[in-house]
C-alpha cells in the first residue's frame, strides 16, 4: 500500500501548490470539479462499500461545492477541498445507514445440506467493475490491496472516523496534520484513530500471500469447469481451506469438502450454463447465466469474485443479485470468453 500512497501524496502536493498559487481569488468551475469525479467515487466506495451510494454522495459533494464556490479561498487545492466535503458526507451518511456486510458477518459457517432464503433486510457489500476503476485519472494508484473485496469488507468493521483516517493516511498518503484538518479533529486524535484502525485491520484480515501471475488462468479453468457443471474440475481448483459466500443468501461455507457438497447438490440441476470472465475489485471474476429446463432464454445467475493464492482459489464470493449483474452488464464489462454447455 506504501508505493501507491506515496504516489498519491506527490500528486496531492502538486495540487495543493497550484491551489495556493491562486490565493484568495480562487475560482472553481464545473470542469475542474468533474475531473475529480471518478477518484472521489473510488474514495467514497471504500468508505461505504457501495458504488451506487458513492455515486450519489459524490454528486451531492459537487452540488455542495458548487453552491459554496464563492467561499473557496484557494488556501488548499480544489482536490483537497472536495475530499473534505466528500469524506464528511460519507461519515454523515453512515450515521443513519446500515454497515454493509458479507454473509460471514452474520454467523458461523452453514451446513451445506441446508438452504436458506435470501436476506433482503441486510445491506450487502457491493463489488465494483475494474473498468470503472481504470477510468479514474488516478487509476495507476488504485492498487489491488486498497480495493480488493476483502479489504473493503474489513474496512466496514471500523468505526466511521477510524475508517476515514485509515483510508486518508494509508491509502491516499496524506500527512497527519492534513488528515486532522479534513476531519476537524486534533492531530493526536487522528494518530490515535489510525493506530486503533491498523490494529483492527491486522486482527480481522488473514495473512495472505500475493497472487501469482496465474490467477487469470485459474479463473479461466474455473469458468470452464463451471459451465460444464464439472464439480470435480472445480474442486481441483479449490484450496483445502477455501471459503464460499453467496450474498444475498445468508449462508456461507468453510473448507473444500463443504463447498463441494453444496455444489453437488445444486449445480448439475440448474440447466444450461454460460460463463465468461471479467474483473472486479482488481480480482478475477466469473459471470454466469443459466437457462433452466423449459425456459427459452438465459438469465443472470451469479457474479463470482475469486481470490487466488499459489494457483488455488481460497475464496469465492458469488453475488446472486440481479442488480449487481445488471450494474456490471451496463459497464459493457462482460466481453470476455463466453460459451455454453448443457448440464
Image: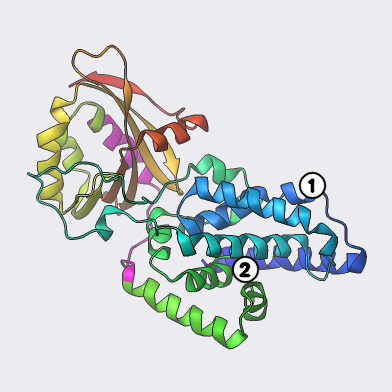
Which residue is labeled 1 in the image?
30
| Mark-to-mark CA distance, 1 and 2 | 28 Å
User: In front: 281, or 24?
Assistant: 24
x then y, percent, for residue 156:
41, 63
Name the residue at 42% across, 46% down: 127
Q: Secondary structure at mark 1?
A: helix
In the figure, is residue 19 to the left or right of 210?
Answer: right
Which residue is labeled 2 in the image?
6
Q: Which residues are magenta?
A: 204-225
**Magenta highlight on residue 141:** no
Name the residue at 22% across, 20% down: 292
Q: Is residue 138 visible?
A: no
Considering only vertical position in the picture, is 160 above or below 244? below
In the figure, is residue 167 to the left or right of 283?
Answer: right
Disc 2: CA contacts within 10 A as few (<14), some (14-19) or many (>=20): some
User: In front: 149, or 23?
Assistant: 23
Amino acid at each position: 500500500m506504501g508505493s501507491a500512497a506515496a504516489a498519491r501524496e506527490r500528486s496531492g502536493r502538486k495540487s495543493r501548490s497550484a491551489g495556493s498559487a491562486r490565493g484568495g481569488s480562487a475560482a472553481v468551475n464545473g470542469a475542474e470539479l468533474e475531473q475529480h469525479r471518478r477518484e472521489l467515487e473510488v474514495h467514497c466506495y471504500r468508505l461505504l462499500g457501495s458504488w451506487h451510494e458513492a455515486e450519489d454522495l459524490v454528486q451531492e459533494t459537487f452540488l455542495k461545492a458548487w453552491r459554496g464556490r464563492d467561499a473557496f479561498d484557494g488556501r488548499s487545492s480544489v482536490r483537497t477541498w472536495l475530499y473534505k466535503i466528500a469524506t464528511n458526507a460519507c461519515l454523515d451518511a453512515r450515521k443513519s445507514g446500515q454497515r454493509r456486510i458479507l454473509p460471514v458477518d452474520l454467523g458461523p459457517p452453514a451446513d451445506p445440506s441446508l438452504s436458506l432464503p435470501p436476506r433482503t433486510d441486510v445491506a450487502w457489500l457491493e463489488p465494483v467493475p475494474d473498468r470503472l476503476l481504470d477510468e479514474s485519472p488516478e487509476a495507476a494508484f488504485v492498487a489491488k490491496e486498497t480495493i480488493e473485496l476483502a479489504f473493503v469488507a474489513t474496512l466496514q468493521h471500523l468505526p466511521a472516523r477510524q475508517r476515514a483516517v485509515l483510508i486518508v493516511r494509508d491509502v491516499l498518503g496524506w500527512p497527519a496534520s492534513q488528515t486532522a484538518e479534513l476531519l476537524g479533529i486534533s492531530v493526536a486524535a487522528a494518530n490515535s484513530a489510525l493506530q486503533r484502525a491498523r490494529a483492527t485491520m491486522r486482527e480481522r484480515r488473514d495473512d495472505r500471500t500475493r497472487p501469482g501471475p496465474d490467477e487469470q488462468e485459474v479463473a479461466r479453468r474455473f469458468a470452464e469447469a463451471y459451465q460444464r457443471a464439472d464439480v470435480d474440475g472445480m474442486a481441483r481448483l479449490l484450496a483445502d481451506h477455501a471459503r464460499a459466500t453467496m450474498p444475498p443468501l445468508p449462508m456461507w461455507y468453510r473448507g473444500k469438502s463443504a463447498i463441494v457438497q453444496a455444489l453437488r447438490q445444486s449445480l448439475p440441476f440448474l440447466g444450461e450454463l454460460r460463463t465468461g470472465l471479467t474483473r472486479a475489485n482488481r480480482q478475477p471474476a466469473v459471470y454466469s447465466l443459466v437457462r433452466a429446463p423449459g425456459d427459452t432464454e438465459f438469465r443472470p445467475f451469479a457474479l463470482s469474485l475469486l481470490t487466488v493464492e499459489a494457483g488455488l482459489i481460497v475464496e469465492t464470493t458469488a453475488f446472486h443479485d440481479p442488480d449487481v449483474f445488471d450494474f456490471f452488464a451496463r459497464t459493457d464489462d462482460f466481453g470476455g470468453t463466453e460459451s455454453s454447455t448443457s448440464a
